[in-house]
Image: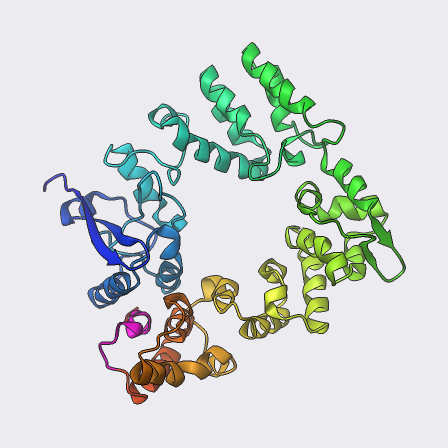
Amino acid sequence: MGAGQLITTKHRSRDTGYISLRSVDEDLAARLPELRLPRMGEQARAAFRAVLAYEKPPANGSVVDVLQLVEARGFSAHPCDWIPEYSWQLGGRHPALYQPWVDWLSEQGLTKFHQGNTLTAENCKRWSRGQRRWALIEMIRNGRDDDFRAVKDFASSQPVSIRLQLVEEIRAWGSIDGAYPWQMPYPWQTPLLEHFLEDRAEKVRSFASYKLEGMGDLRTEEDYARKFAADLTVTEDSVRYRDPPESYTKSVLYTNFDALADALGLAPNELARRSALDETGKPLIQLAAMTGDAEVRSIFATRMLDSGNGGEHIPLAMFVGSAPSLWERGLKAMFASPYVNSVQELLGSKVGTLSSAAMREWPCSHHISETVIAELERGKLPVNTAYDPLRVLGKVVDKHAAAEVQDEALAAGMAPDNPRLTMLKLNLAL
């Protein structure tokens, strides 16, 4: 058996000129680590390749929804058909299922380390500074899960230059100056930034001190909650902004729902019941969507549905961990949303299970024949591939419903080899 090689297949694209899809040859496919799911069979592979050839996904994020259906049916892609993009510009944003391939290829020296790789103490020096930056940011973002223990352990084995880079990335990122309070002191944990005040190198200690001083007097989520609370009006039946500011991004991102409730002298569930649902309460809705308290999220979701809010106005996070009856209400609300892909996002691991009866409640299914006839008579296609009802439905319905959609399209005059049917054919082949 040979060592094998990476393969790049280029497709012309009217949007970007051309796109490159990555795969490997049979020899390299045999060497790749086994994933937790088996590779799909030959019929499904052919259907998957047809989807890729038609849709020409320009990056990993553009094929995630297709791979979600494949994974939900209990399979993984075959590496001779597709592996995650690994260029420095486009690497990352692939499903976690394929992480073993991504890391193995870089560890073997077949691809450069990029932001989609797993950063470890052992491979850190093999990264370019620019790509390592994104990996450090991801490590910090995930650090709350273990009280930053993994971050601190990683830092302890690294030279001064990398520890300095790590401290540099302890910040809010994006358009916000400074660091997030959760990277600051906490009463119940050793804070991340303050941890580096005890670093063995003066450069690191000085930089950490400089960043802490830049936070001013507001350093904890509780501090920001009190500042946030001062701008709110509390009555027996409502909590709302007195005068909504032009931007409240910092107020939302710098605290948490429990801390705000405490600053207002309310229990979290009581704040959830009183929060205004109009523009004056929008920051409270956004803050609630980020809480780990399922009861709080469910209260908001129920109230928003009861008040007639459409699915496009309700954060999908509100339905995570909710009771089945509330989740079903959320699904029907998403059916009415103009953002058709929100249905797939809510379904999550349940994609590929939507029944024919449920599908027919979704207005998206009412346009199958209409779009086929529009293409036949006027050459008119859906506004873009992502909003084609044949694709949207093909990603989420069960096999019986997929066959029903395909039959309806064919009955309306669509040719059996029309590439718009590729997603439905993949659904049926899995």
The residue positioned farthest toward the bottom in the image shown = 411
In percent of width and height, residue 237 lies at: 86, 62
| Quadrant in the rendering for residue 411 | bottom left
The residue positioned farthest toward the left in the image shown = 1
Eyeballing the image, is 386 above or below 409? above
| Quadrant in the rendering for residue 430 | bottom left
Residue visible at 84% across and 60% down in the picture: 238
Pick whichever, 430 or 275, lies toward us: 275
Over which residues does the magenta segment extend? 415-427
- Magenta stretch holds residue 8: no
In percent of width and height, residue 191 lies at: 65, 28
| Quadrant in the rendering for residue 203 | top right
Eyeballing the image, is 267 above or below 165? below
In percent of width and height, residue 419 lies at: 26, 72
Q: Is residue 177 visible?
A: yes
- Magenta stretch holds residue 420: yes
Q: Is residue 425 visible?
A: no
* Drawn side of residue 295 relative to residue 382, left or right: right
Residue visible at 28% across and 56% down in the picture: 77
Q: Quadrant of the N terminus?
A: top left
**Does the magenta stretch mainly form a helix, a strand or a loop?**
helix
* Drawn side of residue 330 relative to residue 234, left or right: left
Residue visible at 40% across and 36% down in the picture: 118
In percent of width and height, residue 329 lies at: 61, 73
